[in-house]
Image (tube, coloured by chain):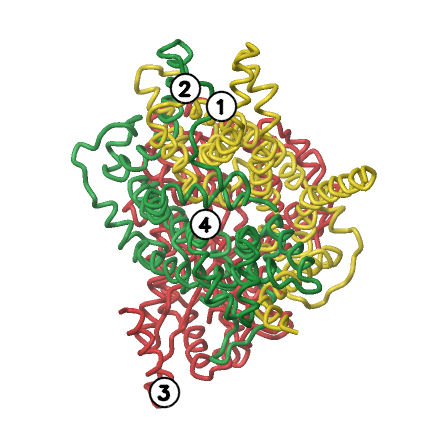
Amino acid sequence: MGKLPAIIGTLPMMIVAIGVFVIGIAFTVVLSFTNTKFFLINIDFVGMRQYDILWSTPRWLQSVANIWLYGFGHIGLCVVLGFLLAVAMDQRIRGEDTFRTIFLYPFALSAVITGLVWQLMLDPIWGLQAYVRSLGFADFTFAPLANGSTALYGMIIASTWNGVGVTMAILLAGLRGVDEEIWKAAKIDGIPTWRTYISIVIPMMRGATATALVLLVVNTVRTFDIVIAMTGGGPGISTQMPATYVIDSINARNVAQGTAGATVMLLPIAALILLQAFFRWRAARIKARAV
Amino acid sequence: MKLIMSATALLAAALLGGTSVRAADVEVVHWWTSGGEQAAVSVFANEFDATGDKWIDGAIALGETARATVMQRALGGDPPDASQFNPGRQYEELIAAGLLLDLTPLAESEGWADFVRPAQIAEPCLIDGKWWCVPVNIHMQNWAWASVAAFQKAGLEVPTTWDDYLGALPKLQEAGVIPFAVGGDGGGWQISLLANQLILAQLGAETVEKIWKDKDLELAGGADVLKAFQTLKGLGEYADDGSPNRSWADTTSLVIQGEAALQVMGDWAQGEFQVAGQKPGVDYACLLGPLVAEPKYVRTGGDIFVFFKQNDPEVERAQLSLASLMVNPRTQALFNTAKGSAPIRDDVDMSLANDCMKAAIDVLKQDGSVVPDANQWRNEAFTTAQNAIFSDLIYNDATTPEAAQAQFVELLRNAE
Amino acid sequence: MSAATTTYGVEPSGPKPRRVTPARIGIYAFLIVAAIFFLIPLAVMILTSMKPMDEIRGGNIFALPLNPTLDYWVKAWSSACTGRDCNGLAPGFFNSMKITLLAVPISIILSMLNGYALSFWRFRGSELMFGLLVFGAFVPFQVLVYPIIFALSSVKLPWGGTLFGTLPGIVIVHSIFGMPILTLLFRNFFASLPGELFKAARVDGAGFWRIFFSVMLPMSVPITIVAVILQVTGIWNDFIFGLVFAGRENLPMTVQLNNIVRTSTGTVEYSTNMAATILTGAVPLIVYFVSGKWFVRGIAAGAVKG
């Protein structure tokens, strides 16, 4: 009854939603319980064996540890610096457009480019270290990518350079959503500016902060391109990520192992969604009680 | 414009179909992208083009990437016409899936089984009486390449044993050269290669076979192997800051320029010295074993080509023509001279080969000298994990030889 | 739309400034230091690409080129090598163009239809579909790589081969992964339109398609600009899909950039690498500089979650 064209018009969406996001993911999850090498031949179900191997493989364990450290470092820096920049930008400064253009342009560049540029910057022979040494500081050492214990920090610098701008833009939008009257009221009450930010403005920016965080988390879980362009996962395995483990396993004709890793990568997303569902349920219950 | 033109050309070709001249394009994927390697692959390309068919070059940098791409294309139903692999288990899935062209009729008519020697070279291609691939060369992996100039700079002779070399490391460092040249790209395959050759040089062929072929966990977890892991760890401390993501060829380049003292790498590195115009014994030293005074073994790897079924008789004819060309004596001589590898047959004129190569071929001819690469016994999933363990040992200060050894034993235990 | 996209650009709301105070100097100092941090890599890219390696050696990455040259740009564009292929980035540029020009309109039209149907023509299960789609926005791509290789390779093309490794294949992949965000974007946009508009058209007897083409499409120009910017930069900057799905003939510029940089020539030639990097980044950068505020809305929209 008139709805048929709508169903036809959204057919691609249904194919994508079910075909890709439901069946595709189910396919991945099912394969993780098999011994699939590469082609779908000679397949047996092996229970949890792939997961046992996964969690006893040092490279995977390192990848998981890395994504936490990298995630906290990258997201933390983006949020803190992004917020500070947004606050600074919100002080009726001159040249706001110019500053915004400068802070945001890296985001237009791909992760591959970000990785390559920062690889040069951090190269001990060609980059910043050599520059500072040429100024006369012969012992200056800044070559994070050369050492397994610091390489991840080099990657955090690069990805933060890329991502701070967008975080700033979102938080700035949040700041400007705060009512002018609140500032006036705070001033009348004699509350210092910094306290107004911390106890009044920041809590009011929950929406923008959540938006920025979700964007950062989703992108962090996927981290892949920048690793390939910047370090290739090294030195050693010090900058490997779950995503590179998954892709390398598939490439090495160990699809079952790769899909086991991929399935684990779904967990944080699943947790986010469950969390959201829980809050919705709670909100609904509170509402129902109120009636 | 170019697009429209090529589309028109395609259309025309499709319409003309069978009436066109007997010529087919053969797309060949390989990972020979360094200077020396390109000189070698050009031999194949030029010789093949001269037959009237056309070599379509599908070079993809880095073996891991190239093999992954070929596999994905095979899974996607769009494999190239031919592809390079290392002999062993890298292509077992392709055979099992029935995707490869059976070369048996060609091989039997040309008598490949008679002239391909030593027998270990034929084995990875001749499986249950059927030929699935073409061996094109024998690479000997257990070499060290040393810069004479770099050792001179430190006032040292080029060492001939591991003990000499390990003793020389601090002096080299003082002299301002990179004592040990190694690169960590592609997940660390160069370091795995180093570890394999080191264990061969120090513990012998029997140990290598017991560990990688028979999965002797006790031996792999034992004191002798631990010593090799400790040596590796020690060597890592003498690598330079630029090492972690460097390719083997860029690393060899450091040795060529005398900036680094020594690199453990297969004989393909020799191609780079040749392109740079350097002479063995004068500019650089080649140390088989590696670094064994009287080498008894050659660790043989090499390259093979598989051909994918294309269901097109014209392409198949050209594929077989290429397969035949790759093993003929003339191509073998030209190709292997450029590549720095040994030919797969005895009746090849290798007068052009240099002293390093000739010495290796002499060892190769002795009984029991051939030790196959671990690829013959273990699959690529194993290799990838092994690369991670060895490169972690070298580049991660916190990883102890004992921990790396325990990981290696665990990997062997799970290996299929 | 969220606050992020609608309120952007209104006047600063912070406390009113009081002349020149130490605090204000501090703010400017902070902004200027930050700006320098953000600009350094761009400067290094440009400077390095215009001088030979000898002039970079010895810690001179910031030195101005003695004889500025565009030779490395020319080389990166037309003759840098990947293996035996020495055609530079140019083929990658045209491949990226092809992919972008096809995938952007297709993904946008599909998502626009989705958003429109989800706002005005809800049917049984439409919200569930939408929920699944939004879930898709969060899924790491790597989870789906193998199943999609598998799916594409099972579609046989009439002229031989399969969808895998073809231009249509990579366009489909981009359309799939662009759909969640874009659908969200359009759904929120259409939902913000007054319902009377739709009801009036219904009373006039217009159906699904007519309302779409004659009422909704003309009204969605602003949001479509946002979507175009989002997609052009997203697709141009893609690496992993191009790497896996595009096939040898269609490798996008980012993949060729990485190949060129990874091809060994004995020493790393940063001059050419940086020239190649600039060339690859040129398109999204131009989009960014030209579209300014729209770009900000675009990326903010990309971050919007329902």
The residue beneath circle 4 is C230
Q: Earlier in the sequence, mark 4 or mark 2?
A: 2
Q: Residues within 10 Å of mark 2 (few under 14, many from 20)?
A: some
Mark 1 and 4 residues: CB-CB less than 8 Å, in contact?
A: no
**Colour given to chain B in the rendered image:** red
Q: Helix or strand or loop: what does disc 2 sit on?
A: helix
Q: Mark 2 vs mark 1: tell me if same chain.
A: no
Q: Camera-side residue: C36 or B96? A: C36
Q: Mark 3 vs mark 1: tell me if same chain.
A: no
Quadrant for the N terminus of chain B in the image? bottom left
**Colour given to chain A in the rendered image:** yellow
Residue B294 showing in the rendered view: no
The residue beneath circle 1 is A84
| Rendered position, A136 above or below A24 | above
Residue type at tag 2? Phe
User: How far is disc 2 from disc 1 in space, using C-alphas?
Assistant: 9 Å
Q: Helix or strand or loop: what does disc 1 sit on?
A: helix
